[in-house]
Each structure stands twice: as structure tokens, then as C-alpha cells.
């Protein structure tokens, strides 16, 4: 079995700070690999351990931080890694990223499974997996929290707004996993040291024949919610606070 | 301009009608249930209906794509739910169109669309300009439902017999009112210490005639519930949202921001939720909720 | 001079932090309250490669450095500020390094892999009831009869007594005993691998007792009597009568790790302090942090902690030069002063942070609801004297600065 795990270096939104004007300080915010991407790597490595799969990671971008996330993928057990070098990867359209990954998959595949995190931390769009599936022409199962493989068939469970869906399909497929899928293993010092020595293959978008389409962001500012912000302190006067709450509830209901 | 909409609830379809009014476009809809078709034909200029297929993204996409080929829309809209975003990705990928999710505002300037979308866990709004055709996922509640009624056509699709992939569906059992239909929702967060303590939240929701749920950590980490309110769970926009023991993390707030009134109870005066609430009480929920229930029962 | 951690060290630190957030942070209060580190956690730590870090892969170790072991100690202590888990870890990192350095091949291969895997505990047995700092004055004896040493004596304030009895394999200690003529002073001490329990079987002649300590309760402390305990000569560490020197080497390495652990706990205390003084409002809604007496003190405490931290990692760097890189430019005794400095400064800086934190908390700190006392008591043990008394550190430094003829001890 051959598995591809596309991973994304995204802004760590928990560390995002803002100017007083409301402008987000994007440039100084730290970047990291998304939690659901880590779950995708974990699923891939588990399949490697159970079914002797060969696992490959790919990321789009350039620079030491992208090398770092490929090495972290190695430290979790991934066998091979690619970086598709693109400057200013953060404003690439999702379609373009999908085309790049699909092209790489065709070039280095064929893959039985392409597995990635369902939604990235910064755009949480959930669209990359489906885009890749449509470009390659294979089925997608999205938002999976439980994946297994038996006798040539993948079984995946997705919990959605209206209930739980279970799907069964043979490879090749694309799967996107949520952070409920598993608990990603923590690299040990041994695997970290070993990952340092492994090669990372590099390509460009031209190598893959992809034209880069970008999104121009005209304005980016903090989302300030206009709310009344009428707050009562129960510590000072519990009864009054409760009365106020009751008043609000009975008048608004 | 032609707009194609996929949706599953009447409220959402009416919100799509509002968007078509803003953009001045013809509105086409594709829905997956005959039950909705009566109402849908009053909302859409033309409705395409299919039925008898369980939700399976690849199958649904095939059907929606077929409809799209007939209309050739300039803008295609999906709800910003897990299903909607998945279908939008397949759709846009197939047509090589830009796809934007979590949209909260749209404006049109001839053949370009200016969209505002949430990014960074809902902490920021980005304004983007794109040339049509475009695919977009709109956040439920971002637009007001339109009351405009039309006399639309309807066409029943029969090309697909069953799902492309083996599919099994287990419906979610709701005790009482479904979360996304309730006018009042009470939610419990990490301020709660034991699963048994959630009883009081249930009671409060019953007395107010609403629904109740939890935030993601209580469901995914503690296993106290199968569903949760959050960007990876259910997105709601009730009249009143009461957040108890919830700090107000961005990925949770995205899912509730379009509520008309937000009320928060939290013992941490610095909890981010207080800057997103209309009314709030700083205090211990274990003290406040029982007293609140007492007073409400009397009324 | 390079004041940056290498990429490996940064990645390793992050992996330890992730491990601690998942498995240690949620349980640290329970560990201190119950007075034990759960065996399943010890097993996980072994699997994660947190023991025997500086030991070569050849003997089942991780093949890392003393700096990495210090990083592990610091981060584990940040997530268990009572330092019990960090101390358990550092003992199983520092002393196994000495085992690798001076033991016989077959003994190394027997003991070290089990320690690395978390199945056996390896600690230090030097202190006796009549004196810990006075190593040369130990009374435990070992007499050789046909290639077997017969050991008699007792050791006290020894860590790991209970864990050795509960772990799957067992474990033992770096033991020092008198073997030569009394007139030779510290040159008549030999070091041994004292394996008191192995393969789940306790050896004859080892009689342990367990004490109840006021802090750092997660790791057991106790003592034992050795009654005609037999140690095969192959378990001897290094040359006869040279044990004192090996012991001092071991203390040097262990003290660096201890300093790192106390710093981790101090960092936690400082973070708690920062949160508290920002949010605690009094005297008409003024946050504590807005009072200069408070914010100035915070700055001073941070300065002392950072200084101690730099001293510690400098000592770790030097220890790696000597023991891991085996750079001929440096000798073992070059470590004495750098180690004495960090062991002197780190626990004292941390104790000061806890004292101030608890003053800022006020009466709250005096209740068990506030967990600060656990970190205070745990790190305080290193101000009192565990793993090298603070005043001994002062003697070591003074001797170096002023000379032996002035500093008699």
C-alpha cells in the first residue's frame, strides 16, 4: 500500500496578536503543523505498521519551517518527503494547492490512500481534500474520526450534524480526518535524531506543470463583535445578578 | 447573474434568497428531499429535487454537477457545514473555480464579487475580490432569511439510483428540539466538573423550551456527548444562546456568533466570552444556575 | 559562544513538553497527593525514551547528551512542579551514564537496557545516617572473598526504595563502600553496582524501609540495611579504591540535572505568579501587578532564575564536552566549579520564587486547594541538601577561589 499525506504549515491562531488598530500581526505569529494533519500522519503510520504501507509526506511552501514539519513527519514514521517550493504560499488558492498535490500524486504515485487533516487551523475550509479527490478522479470521504482497513476495503466513520455515516470503499481514495481520529504519537529523541539524516526531495510548481493562482486579500482586520457587554458580578451581589438574568430571559423569550 | 444553491433546511434556503436579492440574480436550488420541495419552489426560481440517496459526498456531487451543467451558474452557494464544505470542494475542484468558505458578506461589482470571510478561527475578517464564476460556503445566520415568495418551477431528478459508495446512516437521536432548530440554546463548557452536573443545563433548556449541548472538549475529550457546538460540530444561530462555564474560544464562537442574544456565565472575569456577550454574570455556575432555575420555576 | 539550543534540542524539548502535557500535567497533583508515580506512567516514559538519555544506543540507551537529559528534567519538572517525576527521571539518566563509563561490558548489557526501558530503577546509595556530605566518613564495608564482595552497612535518605520493589525487573544503586585501609581516607572507597532486585526477585541481605517525606512525595525515599550482601566482583564499578572519584563524577552529572529540575519547577511558579498578579485586583480594582514592589520583585526573581538557568546549561554543555564528545581539552574536574555554581544557585532561586508566589497568593497559598506548596516543598529539599548540600557547594567554590589552606571545611 502507498500513502500520501499532504501537510500544511499554518499560523498558530492561539498565538496571534493584534495591533490596537485591529490589524492582526501575521508576520510575527508563529507557524506550526495543524493538529488534524498530525492525526493524518498518525493514521498513515498506523497503516504502515499494520499493513506494511509505504508513506510519503508533502508540503507546499519554502524555508526552514517547511523542512522542519517534513522532518517532524519523518520523526513520526513517514518514509519519504517532498517540499514543493513556492514563495508566499499562504495566499495560494485552495484550487492551486489541490492541483499541485494532485500533480505530485500522479508523478510519484499511484497512491492507494491520500490522507490529510480535515480543516486547517487558519482557514478551516475543509475543501482541500475534496479538491484533490476531484483532480485525481477518486472518491473522497471527509471528516473521518475512525478509519480502518480490512481485506482491501477502507471503512470510515464520519460524525455529522444530522447523525453518523459509515462508508466502505476500496482504494484508491482520499480521506480527510478530524482531530478525533486518534492521538498522534510524540516523536522520541531517537526518531528526532534519525529524521535529521533523511533526505527531503524538492520540486517547483513548474516541475509539476501548475500555474499558481493567488488570492488577493484586500483587507484583513480583527473581527470585532458588537455586543451590549452588560456584565453583572455575582460575587458582589448574587441575588441582583440572578434577578437581572431572569429579567432578560423573560423579556427576550 | 445566475446563482445555484444547495441546502438542506428552509431557513438556510431563505438566507440564500437574501443573497440573491443583494446580488440581483436568478436563484436556482438543488435539494435532496421531496419534503422540502413545496417550500423550495416558493423560494427558488427553479428547484431541482433528488431523493432516495443517503448523503455520500461523491454521489451528491455528481447530481449537483449535473444540475450545474444545465444552468451554468456564475455563483454556487453551499452552507458552511462539514457537508457543505466537502461538496463545495468537490464542485469547485471539478470546475477549477475558486472556492471560499465561511463567508459572511457579499457584494457584486459587475463580473467581480467582493466577499468577506472569517479566517484564523474566526478571529479575523478577510475581504477578497474574485472574478466570477465562484463557489462559496456561507455561514448560517450571516444573512437574514428573506420573506420574498416566488412561483418557481420544479424538476425531479431520477438519474441516480443509489450511492456510489457503500453507505450506512445512523440518525442522531435528539432529546427534544434539534439544536439547529431551537430558538434558545443552552451550552455547557469546561466549567462543569462532572457529567452528572449537565442535568442542570438540561433542566434550564427544558424550562426555557429550548435545546442544550456542550462545547467540543466535553464531547471529544471527556465523551459526555456525541455532538457539540463548534466549527467542527454544529453551527447555530438561535434567538438566545446561553453559554455556561464556557471561556469563548474562537473555534467555538464562530459557531454561535450569529445568535441574536448571547448570555454568558463564567467565574473568570477575563474570559473572552464576556467581550462577545450581550449579558453576562461573573460567578460560580454551581451557585448561579440552581438559583436561576428556582426563580424561573416560580414564574 | 553560541547561546542557542540546536534544532535537535529544540525539537526534543517540544516533544518532551507534548509528552508532559498529555501524560504528566493532568496527574501531577495526584502523584504528589498519593505519593507515587503510577507504574504505567513510568513504562510510558521508558517507551518515550526519557531514561538513559546520555547512554549509548549500544547498551539500550538513547544515544543523546547530558544537555538533552537536562532539558528533559527541566520540562518534566515544569509539568510536575513537585519535581518527583523529574527526580525519578534524572536519577535514571545521570547514574546510568557512570555505569556505562566504568562497568564491565556484560554488566552494562545486563543492566542498562532495562533501565532505559523503565523496567528497572537505578539510583545512588551514598548517604549514611551519620553524614551525607561527609562521604569519606562512610562506614559501610565491602570485604572481598574469592571474587565476591561481602557488604555490610546501611544507607539512608535513598530514593527509589519502593519503586525497585514494584517495577517488573527491579533495580539497584551506585553504591560506595569502604574497601581499603582506613588510613587512606577517601582513597579506600570502591563503587559497586548494587543490584538489590532483579528478574522480580529480591536478593538476600537487603533490608529496606520507607520514610514519609513532607514533599517531592511522588518518588519514594527510604533506607536499607545490608547484611552480608554478596556482590560478584564483575559488578564492581571501575578500579578498586577509586570509587570516591567516580562518585564525584556522578554527583557532578546528577547535580546538573537536579539544577535543571528545580529551574523547571521555578519556571512554573513564575508563570503562576504572572497569571495571578495580573488578575488579582485589590484596593479599588488595582491589579497586584500594578504595584511596583510586586513587579520589581518579579523582575528580580526572573533575573535570578534565568541566571541559574544559564549556569546550568553551561555546566551541561561542559559535561557533554567531557563525557559525550570526549574532547581532550577538558578534564572531569573542570566540571567541579560550574556544577557547584548551578547547584548552589538554582534551588535557591526557585525557593525564593515560591516564597514570593505564596506571599502574593496570601492565605490561599496556605490551603491545599492551592498547589504551590507542593512545588515549594519539593524544590526546598534541594536547598536543604539533597544531591549535594548547599554549603558543600560553597566550600567547593571557595576552595577554588581562595585556596585549600584557607578553606578547611
Image (cartoon, rainbow, N blue to C red):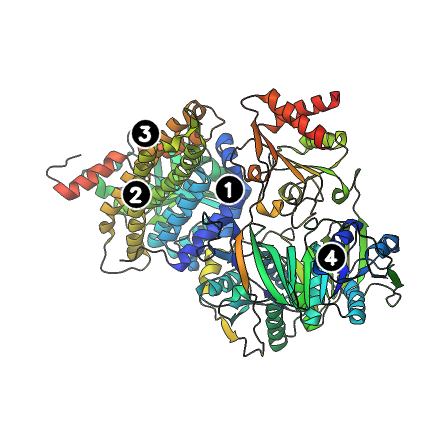
Secondary element at image label 3: loop
Q: Residue at x 53, y 22 (%)?
A: A236
Secondary element at image label 2: helix
Report crowding for label 4: few under 14, some 14 to 19, many 20 or more residues within 10 A (C-alpha): few
Left or right: A30 as drawn, with respect to B214: left
Residue found at the far left of this picture:
C405
Quadrant where the C terminus of chain A is found in the figure? top right
Which label sits in the foreground, 4 or 2?
A: 4
Q: Is residue A161 visible?
A: yes
- Measured as percent of width and height from the top left, residue C163 is found at 48, 38
Q: Nearer the viewer, residue C232 or C222?
A: C222
- Gap in Å between the C-alphas at discs 4 and 2? 67 Å
Left or right: C184 as drawn, with respect to A158: left
Which label sits in the foreground, 3 or 4?
A: 4
Check contact, mark 4 vs mark 2: CB within 8 A.
no
Above or below for B229 versus B44:
above
Q: Nearer the viewer, residue B194 or C90?
A: B194
Which label sits in the foreground, 2 or 1?
A: 2
- Label 4 lies in what chain? B
Q: Residue at x 29, y 49 (%)?
A: C315
Task: Determine the image quadrant of residue C260.
Answer: top left
Check contact, mark 3 vs mark 1: CB within 8 A.
no
Compare marks 3 and 2 and give the one earlier in the sequence. 3
Q: Nearer the viewer, residue A49 or B183?
A: B183
Left or right: A13 as drawn, with respect to C326: right
Res. C308 mark: 2
Which label sits in the foreground, 4 or 1?
A: 4
The residue indicated by pointer 4 is: B21
The residue indicated by pointer 3 is: C129
Compare marks 3 and 1 and give the one earlier in the sequence. 1
Amino acid at each position: 500500500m502507498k500513502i500520501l499525506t499532504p501537510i500544511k504549515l499554518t499560523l498558530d491562531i492561539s498565538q496571534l496578536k493584534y495591533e490596537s488598530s485591529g490589524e492582526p500581526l501575521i508576520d510575527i505569529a508563529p507557524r506550526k503543523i495543524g493538529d488534524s494533519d498530525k492525526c493524518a500522519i498518525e493514521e498513515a503510520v498506523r497503516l504502515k505498521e499494520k499493513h506494511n504501507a509505504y508513506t510519503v509526506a508533502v508540503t507546499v511552501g519554502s524555508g526552514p519551517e517547511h523542512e522542519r514539519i517534513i522532518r517532524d513527519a519523518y520523526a513520526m514514521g513517514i518514509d519519504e518527503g517532498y517540499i514543493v517550493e513556492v514563495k508566499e504560499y499562504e495566499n495560494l488558492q485552495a484550487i492551486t494547492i489541490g492541483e499541485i498535490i494532485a500533480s505530485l500524486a500522479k508523478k510519484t504515485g499511484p497512491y492507494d490512500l491520500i490522507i490529510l487533516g480535515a480543516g486547517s487551523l487558519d482557514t478551516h475550509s475543509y475543501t482541500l481534500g475534496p479538491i484533490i479527490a476531484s483532480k485525481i478522479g477518486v472518491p473522497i470521504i471527509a471528516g473521518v474520526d475512525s478509519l480502518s482497513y480490512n481485506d482491501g476495503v477502507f471503512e470510515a466513520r464520519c460524525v455529522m450534524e444530522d447523525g453518523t455515516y459509515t462508508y466502505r470503499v476500496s482504494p484508491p481514495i482520499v480521506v480527510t480526518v478530524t482531530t478525533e481520529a486518534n492521538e498522534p504519537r510524540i516523536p522520541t529523541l531517537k526518531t528526532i535524531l534519525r529524521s535529521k539524516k533523511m533526505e527531503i526531495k524538492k520540486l517547483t510548481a513548474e516541475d509539476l506543470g501548475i500555474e499558481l493562482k493567488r488570492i488577493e486579500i484586500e483587507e484583513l482586520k480583527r473581527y470585532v463583535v458588537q455586543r451590549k457587554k452588560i456584565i453583572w458580578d455575582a460575587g458582589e451581589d448574587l441575588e441582583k445578578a440572578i434577578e437581572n438574568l431572569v429579567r432578560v430571559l423573560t423579556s427576550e423569550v | 447573474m445566475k446563482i445555484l444553491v444547495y441546502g438542506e433546511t428552509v431557513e438556510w434556503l431563505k438566507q440564500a434568497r437574501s443573497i440573491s436579492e443583494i446580488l440581483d440574480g436568478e436563484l436556482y436550488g438543488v435539494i435532496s428531499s421531496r419534503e422540502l420541495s413545496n417550500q423550495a419552489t416558493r423560494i427558488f426560481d427553479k428547484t431541482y429535487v433528488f431523493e432516495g440517496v443517503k448523503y455520500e459526498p461523491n454521489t451528491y456531487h455528481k447530481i449537483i454537477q449535473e444540475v450545474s451543467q444545465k444552468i451554468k451558474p456564475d455563483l454556487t452557494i453551499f452552507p458552511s457545514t462539514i457537508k457543505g464544505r466537502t461538496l463545495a470542494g468537490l464542485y469547485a475542484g471539478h470546475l477549477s473555480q475558486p472556492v471560499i468558505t465561511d463567508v459572511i458578506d457579499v457584494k457584486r461589482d459587475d463580473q467581480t464579487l467582493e466577499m468577506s470571510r472569517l479566517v484564523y478561527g474566526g478571529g479575523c475578517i478577510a475581504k477578497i475580490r474574485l472574478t466570477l464564476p465562484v463557489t462559496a460556503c456561507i455561514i448560517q445566520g450571516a444573512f437574514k432569511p428573506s420573506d420574498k415568495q416566488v412561483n418557481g418551477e420544479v424538476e425531479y431528478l431520477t438519474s441516480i439510483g443509489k450511492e456510489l459508495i457503500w453507505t450506512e446512516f445512523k440518525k442522531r437521536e435528539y432529546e427534544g428540539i434539534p439544536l439547529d432548530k431551537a430558538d434558545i440554546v443552552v451550552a455547557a463548557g469546561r466549567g462543569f466538573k462532572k457529567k452528572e452536573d449537565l442535568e442542570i443545563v438540561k433542566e434550564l433548556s427544558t424550562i426555557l423550551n429550548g435545546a442544550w449541548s456542550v462545547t467540543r472538549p466535553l464531547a471529544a475529550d471527556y465523551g459526555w456527548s456525541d455532538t457539540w457546538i463548534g466549527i467542527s460540530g454544529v453551527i447555530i444561530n438561535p434567538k438566545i444562546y446561553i453559554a455556561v462555564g464556557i471561556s469563548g474560544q474562537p473555534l467555538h464562537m464562530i459557531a454561535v456568533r450569529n445568535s441574536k442574544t448571547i448570555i454568558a456565565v463564567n467565574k473568570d472575569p477575563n474570559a473572552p466570552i464576556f467581550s462577545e456577550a450581550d449579558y453576562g454574570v461573573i460567578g460560580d455556575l454551581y451557585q448561579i444556575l440552581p438559583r436561576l432555575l428556582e426563580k424561573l420555576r416560580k414564574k | 559562544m553560541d547561546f542557542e539550543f540546536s534544532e535537535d534540542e529544540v525539537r526534543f524539548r517540544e516533544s518532551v513538553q507534548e509528552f508532559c502535557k498529555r501524560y504528566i500535567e493532568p496527574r501531577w497533583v495526584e502523584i504528589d497527593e498519593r505519593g507515587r508515580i503510577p507504574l504505567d506512567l513510568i513504562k510510558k516514559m521508558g517507551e518515550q525514551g526519557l531514561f538513559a538519555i546520555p547512554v549509548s544506543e549500544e547498551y539500550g540507551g538513547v544515544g543523546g547528551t547530558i544537555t538533552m537529559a537536562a532539558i528533559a528534567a527541566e520540562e518534566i519538572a515544569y509539568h510536575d512542579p513537585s519535581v518527583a517525576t523529574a527526580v525519578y527521571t534524572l536519577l535514571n539518566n545521570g547514574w546510568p551514564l557512570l555505569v556505562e563509563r566504568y562497568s564491565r561490558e556484560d554488566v552494562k548489557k545486563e543492566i542498562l537496557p532495562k533501565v532505559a526501558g523503565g523496567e528497572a530503577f537505578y539510583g545512588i546509595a551514598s548517604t549514611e545516617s551519620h553524614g551525607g556530605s561527609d562521604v569519606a566518613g562512610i562506614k559501610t564495608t565491602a570485604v572481598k572473598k574469592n571474587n565476591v564482595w561481602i557488604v555490610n552497612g546501611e544507607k539512608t535518605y535513598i530514593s527509589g526504595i519502593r519503586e525497585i520493589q514494584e517495577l517488573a525487573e527491579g533495580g539497584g544503586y551506585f553504591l560506595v563502600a569502604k574497601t581499603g585501609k582506613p588510613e587512606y581516607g577517601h582513597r579506600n572507597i570502591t563503587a559497586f553496582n548494587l543490584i538489590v532486585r532483579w528478574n522480580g526477585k529480591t536478593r538476600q541481605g537487603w533490608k529496606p524501609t520507607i520514610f514519609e517525606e513532607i514533599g517531592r512525595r511522588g518518588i519514594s525515599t527510604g533506607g536499607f540495611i545490608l547484611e552480608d550482601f554478596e556482590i560478584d566482583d564483575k559488578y564492581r564499578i571501575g578500579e578498586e579504591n577509586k570509587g570516591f572519584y567516580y562518585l564525584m563524577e556522578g554527583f557532578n552529572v546528577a547535580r546538573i540535572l537536579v539544577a535543571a529540575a528545580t529551574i523547571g519547577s521555578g519556571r512554573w511558579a513564575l508563570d503562576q505568579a504572572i497569571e495571578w498578579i495580573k488578575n488579582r485586583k485589590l484596593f479599588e480594582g488595582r491589579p497586584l501587578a500594578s504595584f511596583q514592589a510586586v513587579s520589581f520583585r518579579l523582575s528580580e526573581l526572573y533575573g535570578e532564575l534565568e541566571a541559574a538557568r544559564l549556569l546550568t546549561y553551561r555546566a551541561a554543555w561542559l559535561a557533554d564536552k567531557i563525557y559525550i564528545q570526549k574532547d581532550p581539552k577538558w578534564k572531569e574536574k573542570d566540571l567541579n566549579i560550574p556544577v557547584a555554581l548551578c547547584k548552589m544557585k538554582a534551588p535557591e532561586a526557585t525557593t525564593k520564587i515560591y516564597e514570593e508566589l505564596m506571599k502574593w497568593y496570601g492565605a490561599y497559598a496556605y490551603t491545599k486547594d492551592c498547589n504551590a506548596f507542593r512545588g515549594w516543598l519539593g524544590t526546598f529539599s534541594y536547598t536543604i541538601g539533597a544531591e549535594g548540600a548547599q554549603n558543600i557547594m560553597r566550600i567547593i567554590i571557595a576552595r577554588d577561589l581562595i585556596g585549600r589552606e584557607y578553606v578547611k571545611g
